[in-house]
Amino acid sequence: MASPLRRLRRILLGACVLVVTLVIAIAGSVAWTWTSADVSTVGTTEFTQPLRIPPVADSTVDATGTRVFSLDMRTGTTEFEPGRATETWGFNGSYLGPTVRAARGERVRVQVRNQLPEASTVHWHGMHLPAAMDGGPHQMVDPGASWTPEWTVAQPASTLWYHPHPHGATEDHVRRGLAGMFLIDDAPSARLPLPHTYGVDDIPVIVQDMRLRDSRLDGTHAIFRDIGFLGDRTMVNGTRSPYQEVGDELMRLRLLNASTARIYTFAFDDARPFAMIGSDGGLLERPTTLDRVRLSPGERAEIVVRMKPGERTVLRSEKLEAGLDFWSGRFSGADDTFDVLELRAAPTLRPSAALPQTLVPPSIPDGTDSVAERRFDLTLAGINGKRMDMSRIDTTVTRGTTETWVVRNVDGMPHNFHVHDVQFRVLDYDGAPPPPELTSAKDTIFLPPNTAATLALRFDGPADPTTPYMYHCHLLWHEDVGMMGQFTVVEPGQQAATPPGHAHWPCHIDAIALNSSRSEFNTR
Ligand code: C2O
Ligand code: CU
Ligand code: CU
């Protein structure tokens, strides 16, 4: 046989072997990545640390009756592992922040100071307040600067929270430790026989996932994690492996998912039932008995669990059942499980009053007077196909009206949807009436792939045509890369204007032509 032919055959054979080896190597590393992508701390957590309870924020009341708080955004170090310091950020401390507490009807003012090396904001998640006080990406506070929002608390007793909202860096700032609870009290809830002694039978449970590498907080996104940052363990109130001593028969846990991307399915290790009494925007109409509750980032649930003398039970997070496919489920953390918090009952417990049959009347619109219906289609590429633009107002709503928003996840990965300023009612979830845990005031709703929710939202003002509120996916990396839009509340007949500092000039070419039509550009 001619030797060139033999050479060609050898070359071809060699190429084949190379290709096959490459394919095996790639498949092998993908398979390895897949099998090593799930994490679990179930059964291996020792619960050695007493749960840290964030202090209630100090306040003073000024001559006008305004309650004044101070929140300093700082850098510091935190010992997550005994004897090893980790650099963290916090409010008035090194990690997380104090629990801010105010009553309905009170005027509050918060002196926010930014002592961080970068600009940030403080947003009051779940709060109904003027847009200029909202702390979204238009209220940036430069390093060394302060910002002093002021508003009147005008909503029912609820478990809200605060966290930074700088566009493009929210995941990073929250993950470093900037978050805290904001509790609202009111007379109707105070009259109910519910556990309400803070830190005793009424416990803040701020759940976050984290990962340490050489005692540093590691915020890198592992490969294939379209969901954003996922940690390899959880902590509560900044405490790893936490336990809480229980001295009362009934314990109220205010669960807050303050993680940047992780979705939890909370349940007890012995599958004991518990009562859910509150949701994002306050108490439910009546307690509902559940054995699990799912919270996506930003969502809250107030639950009450009954303990027997001397027993222990562990709050867990179980696998996520959200119809995710094999691939996106694994890389969204759906297969992960965590031991979150151990409750340790004393040998004798103080008796607790039985839970009331009814809690509070509904505070949210039923949608019957809705004046507009809008659609919001969610994908990682943006909302309704558009990426966030600080200078574009996506939606203008009229003060005092109710609207119906149909929000759909049209993507292959999990998302959720959070709206600033309002608490909404879920009219329909995944083609059915909402389950009991979604029947009360919500500001954030989880949407698995191919799921739609119909929401009724009432915009009670005040109007501010130049300052938008945000709606967005609260998986914070998704928000950072542009899954966010802006809405403005205006008086009837008024138009939204371009937010100040973000005047939107398409380019410099036609400056003169644009000049003549400036008013059009300013009132879009
Ligand atoms: Cu909790 Cu727009 O945020
Ligand atoms: Cu918010
Ligand atoms: Cu998302």
Image (tube, rainbow, N blue to C red):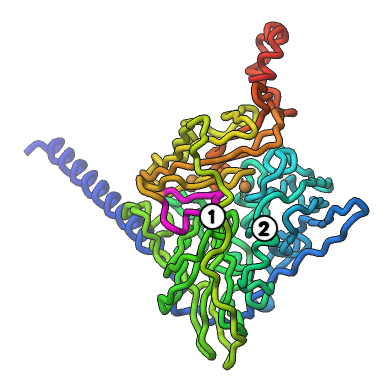
Name the mark on residue 297: 1
Asked if the residues shown at circle 2 and circle 1 are in contact, with their CB atoms under 8 angstroms apart, the answer is no
Location of residue 284 in the rendering, given as x and y in whole percent from the top left corner: 54, 59
Q: Is residue 380 visible?
A: yes
> Could you tell me the amino acid type at mark 1?
Pro
Residue at 42% x, 52% y: name it.
434
Relative side of 210 to 191, left or right: left
Residue 330 lies in quadrant? bottom left
Q: Is residue 436 magenta?
A: yes
Marks 2 and 1 sit apart, C-alpha to C-alpha, by 12 Å
Query: What residue is disc 2 on?
Result: 179
Location of residue 472 in the rendering, given as x and y in whole percent from the top left corner: 55, 42
- List the single residue furthest toward the left: 1
Q: Quadrant of the C terminus?
A: top right
Residue at 68% x, 27% y: name it.
491
- Label 2: state its secondary structure: loop
> Could you tell me the amino acid type at mark 2?
Ala
